[in-house]
Amino acid sequence: MKKPLSVEEYLDRTDDYLRISSFFALHAAQLTPLRALAREVAELTEQTGAFIQAHTAVVCPSCAKVCCATRHSYHEVADIIYLCALGEAIPVYEKGRAGSDPCQFMGERGCLIARSLRPYRCNWYFCTPLLEHMQSLSARRYRRFMEMTTELGRKREALLDIYRETEKE
Ligand code: SF4
Ligand code: SF4
């Protein structure tokens, strides 16, 4: 008999998504500022993605241990709050995959999920070879990338703060 998957191996986020999306529907007016922040975070994510993509295109094709495993593909609660603020839903996760299996969203040319809709950890994980490559070409471009990343992180935190405060009221 197949051993049941542990919680770590399949983290079904459907209940979190239903709870959070209902909260958005009930508090639409209070959460309006949060929607604007989410759009700004999405835009910055796509903009910084162009820089990341230029480096992953060089470094990742020869990688011996691809980092895109199933256990990384689940959206956390903070990701779901952000997705709901954008009016987006979580993807449909396939059941029965082990945490170490290749991620179901990995396509032939990379991740099938738009960069701004991926789990936060996916966009901001840089292995050492990738990080070194990103830092090696242009100090000015890397600095600009870091500034945008910091701004993005601040906006995301502000968004989550508004949500948590609204939830407490
Ligand atoms: S980010 Fe690093 S670990 Fe992940 S696939 Fe690219 S080279 Fe491999
Ligand atoms: S970046 Fe995409 S393919 Fe990679 S683990 Fe995240 S969701 Fe999966």
Image: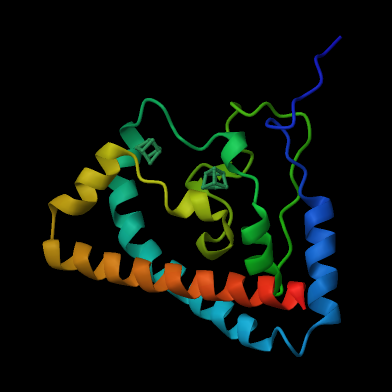
- In the picture, the quarter occupied by the N terminus is top right
Percent coordinates x, y for residue 26 in the rendering:
86, 80
Residue in the foreground of this view, choosing between 136 and 78: 78
At x 80%, y 68%, the residue is 21
* Residue 130 in picture, x, y percent from top left: 28, 43
Place residue 80 in its image quadrant: bottom right
Is 104 placed above or below 99 here? below
Report the side of 37 relative to 20 (left or right).
left
Q: In which quarter of the image is ligand 2?
A: top right
Q: Considering the image in quadrants, where does the C terminus appear? A: bottom right
Q: In this view, does 57 lie to the left or right of 121?
A: left
Q: Residue at x 14, y 50 (%)?
A: 136
Q: In this view, does 121 lie to the left or right of 126?
A: right
Residue 152 in sight in this render: yes
**Residue at x-position 76% and y-position 90%:** 29
**Image x and y of residue 83, in percent:** 66, 67
